[in-house]
Amino acid sequence: MKTITYLKGDATNPQIEGNKIITHICNDIGGWGKGFVLAISTRWKNPENEYRKWFQNGENFTLGEIQMVLVEDNLWVCNMIAQHKIITNSKGIPPIRYEAVEKCMEKLSDEALKLNASVHMPRIGCGLAGGKWEEIEPIIERTLQKNNIEVFVYDFE
């Protein structure tokens, strides 16, 4: 089984040969404007535009769904809906939904296998979504790594 490779650097600029998918977590209310999405939007307009279109038409726009957006030759951005709303609720539950992360990762795994692509991400779900990496990492192991997909996690300096 492949292990996760941790790198220092920018997840929007993977320096690996071959097909690549950059993945990140989106919310289920159509909001795009804070966190890692800003780095994506700085580089490419399409992921945000496609996400907003998807939200507007509402088709399959639910937790656990993904959207693949081609941004360059051999490079896709995967919008994963795995965050419910954008703030911690009154019971102290953060927006991240781990079950949804797992469903998204299973779908991403299928896409990565089809494209023979490596997967690149920041520590998804651990910023504004309020998740814990100790919860996310085993999900990556159960989904992507189980299928022998190369995974690169970036810590921005």
Image: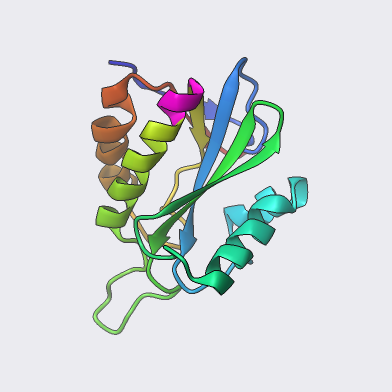
Towards the viewer: 49 or 40: 49
Q: Please say if 132 is above or below 107.
A: below
| Dominant secondary structure, magenta | helix
Residue drawn at point x = 28 percent, y = 47 percent: 102
Res. 34 visible in picture:
no
Residue drawn at point x = 30 percent, y = 23 percent: 147
Q: Left of 4 or right of it: where is 9?
A: right
Q: Left of 97 or right of it: where is 26?
A: right
Query: Which residues are drawn in magenta?
Result: 112-116
Residue drawn at point x = 75 percent, y = 45 percent: 43
Where does residue 120 sit, x and y in percent of width and height?
52, 33
The N terminus appears in which quarter of the rendering?
top left
Where does residue 22 sit, x and y in percent of width and height?
56, 38
Towards the viewer: 157 or 87: 87
Q: Please say if 2 is above or below 33.
A: above
Q: Please say if 108 is above or below 91.
A: above
